[in-house]
Image (cartoon, helix red, strand yellow):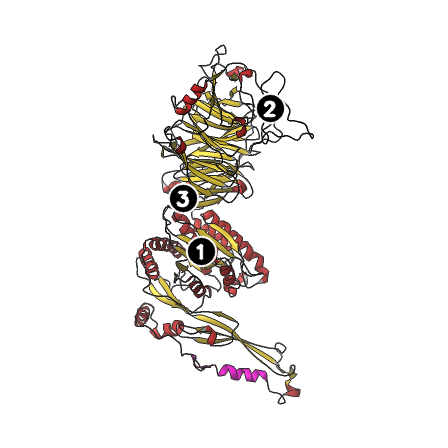
Amino acid sequence: MDHRRIYSGGQADIHVWCRVSFQLAGLLQGHTGSVLALELCKEKSWLISSSGDSTVRIWNTDTLESLYVLSPFADYNSGDIFSIAFSAATHTLFLGCQNTSLQWFDLSEGSRDWNYNTKRGSTHLGDSPQNLPSRKPHKFFDSQPQPAGRPTPSPHPGSCVLPVTPSSTLRSLPGATTPPLANNHHLQMSTSNSTSESGDHHEDSKPAETHVLSIPQDNWVPSAHYGYIYCMAIVPEHEIDGQVAEKQRKTVQLVTGSGDEDVKLWSYNPDPADTANNITLLHTFYAQVGGVLSIISRNGNIYAGCQGGHVKVWDIETKTLVRTIIVQESVDILSLSMTDGELYTCSAGGCIQRFSPTFDNTGCWRGHSGTVLTSIIVPSKHDGKKTADDRLDLITGGDDNNIKVWGIRRPSNNKQNDSSAAQVALSHKSVPSQEANLVGETEVDEANDTLVNALSQFVSFPSVSGSLTHHEDCRQAAIWLKKCLIQFGAESQLLYGVEDKNPVVFGLFRGSESKQVRRRVLFYGHYDVIAAGPPSSWQHDPFTLTGLNGYLYGRGVTDNKGPVLAVACAASEMLARRSLDIDLVLLVEGEEEAGSGGFEEAVRKYKDQIGHIDAILVSNSYWIDDARPCITYGLRGVIHATIEVHGEGPDVHSGVDGGAHIEPMMDMTKVLSKLSEGTRIAVPSFYDNVRKPLNEEDESFKLLSEVTGRTPASFSSRWREPTLSVHSIQDSGLSGNPTIIPSRVRAKISVRIVPDQDLKTIIIIDRTADWWIGSFNHPWFKALESAIYDEWGVQPLRIREGGSIPSVPFLEKEFGCPAVHLPMGQSSDQAHLRNERISLNNLRKGKSVFERFFHRMSTTTE
């Protein structure tokens, strides 16, 4: 598109539309195959087109006449030319071919490529199609089913051009055929616009001669990809008023996308004295979600539209994946356009969607009744004049035989007005090739907080691990979290350790590639929750996120879905700012509330994939009150055990057999009574290995006493000393029958253990969780403590927890590195109870603490 016209490629012709009247102004004819790509060079008044006929044509946009026909190296063996890109800085045209080759031609007058063709002798084309070069059939690209022993048909007698057949292009139109060749190869003006549209064209003027150029042998990379090169784009050096511009520089960067699922970044140097090094591969980005069908480069990022509905976003400088946008699953993304950080995606299903600079979906509407093939954003024009306001036009073309112009506005620079600007309804005018086809659109309100919006969806899954009824809900929660992490910019997959156990969600945020040695932090969390109980016992639906008085209510908001999403959002935002200089690994299990079954097996099974770990980060506990931030440095371990006493025979009646048998219930009560004396456990040698308190910890307890008003001894008994609890007694008798002497009695007990008690030497057990203790002096502890102070402006209280998290000590031992623990919730969060909640302020500040900690991890020296 230029300031006067809109150009659209069809099955062979290029339609020319007037931007003022939106009427068809003429046809550019010359290609004999589908027009696959168009590129405009405003400086030279050129329109460049590529086609399935294995040629590129260059047209004069002032006279609308054909100037050059460019043949790729290897001629028609190159197949369809799917993509082109023109560098205004070097006047170089790049071609992406069906035979996987990348080719280029320097169109500067007097260039080596130009002189190469001059020495060969330039061919001139006039009005006669007989002067066109002969198109030889290709054994692969032009193959058709033939009877045995029958050769490929030869051209028509007296003609040097093969009969035109539809090319095997990505953008083939259902039921469409290629029209026959025109009698000449210049503009065919429509009679109604032959004089009004272009004053410099005259029907009796002699058409310009068309020069045939060939790409030299040195100007190609024969196997640039392992698939067709569907798209390419020049990397802009800077932007002026929202319009992409290149600096006058010696080298150009080019990105290409292919059906091999890769995006490649190239550097081009037009030095004629060093043809062997004209182009260099700088980096390969792996999409891993299907072929790359569309690509743009803006704001230092590469945006790649892929098969299956994904858009991958990479940072060019750091070579890192910033975000994966799941636009519409299983629907290919065929075109991308961007202005002022807002991304517009066009899909094979006819849908157009808009995403904000923070990747929130801010608009979605049905653009075409068929596939949306192409799009571009340009300043609006009214009555032939450029508008002075912020209005832009999004122009889209589809296989429904329509081109459409949608009026959009630039996003406001005033942050206070961002949300209102995003809600301005889109208007559109239709530019159909045959008839109008106006379509409405639906707006999607912009989410003003990605973290809260994601948490509302996460909480909606009743992922109760202790109930077989909710097994599928757990699986769906894991699938949702995997997709969420992908959209946040991570690589993610589900890891299975034990059959019939919920999967572990693995996520990996890769830090800046420019930092050669990056520390690796493993965040441990869980997506399963405790049963909520009757919904009527809650103030609100436990699986619907509800905000009230600065708190978010819902099952799992504080234990542990909120902290999991906070750390993921922190990494995602740092990726977007190009400031993530560590690798963040997430292991989020689905069995923590039910004993972490299968977690250890999954970690060991995929340990090589998880890789080396420098530190373990946990956020699964709470402050000591609601006012002062804390840092957790210790957890008690736990042993869950069963004690069983049984007699020789069956249950008996106390009135018939009472006194004749030793009663198991009496023996059980004697056993339980001898396990403890008051709060002390009476098991011999039980306290032998309990670690003696440190003076530093005693000082910490005194500070806690001053803050909370509790005694130091109360903290010691809750955190530092072992305990024994009896939870239930069950018998084999009929429930509630007071006359039965049960033959079997079972008691459920738990023992909380502390450093340095050994799990293996205490009791025969059912399920265990080892104790964990951190170090005040370790650099990672100090880094987290400093991050909390920097965010909250107050020194955090050092606390321990009386509860247990089995996976923390396991991960420390498995990866041979220390763990640190950030409590995010408040003491009144009601974890495991009715009306569970988390402070919105704590959630957001917790995310910021993670960001500060990651930064310190990348700069702290051990």
Nearest to the eye among marks 1 and 3: give it: 1
Label 1 vs 2, first from the N-terminus: 2
Vertical relation: 852 (above or below) 97: below
Residue at mark 1 to residue at mark 2: CA–CA distance: 55 Å
Label 3 vs 2, first from the N-terminus: 2
Disc 1 is placed on an element classified as loop
Disc 3 is placed on an element classified as loop
Residue bearing the label numbered 2 = 164
Vertical relation: 648 (above or below) 319: below
Vertical relation: 246 (above or below) 730: above
Answer yes or no: is residue 486 visible: yes
Q: Is residue 595 left or right of residue 793?
A: right
**Residue 116: image x %, image y %?**
42, 22
Magenta stretch holds residue 69: no
Which region shows up in magenta? 659-683
Q: Amino acid at mark 3?
A: Lys
Residue bearing the label numbered 1 = 611
Mark 1 in CB contact with mark 3 (< 8 angstroms): no
Mark 3 in CB contact with mark 2 (< 8 angstroms): no
Q: Amino acid at mark 1?
A: Gly
Residue at mark 3 to residue at mark 2: CA–CA distance: 44 Å
Q: Amino acid at mark 2?
A: Val
**Residue 537: image x %, image y %?**
52, 63
Which label is found at residue 319? 3
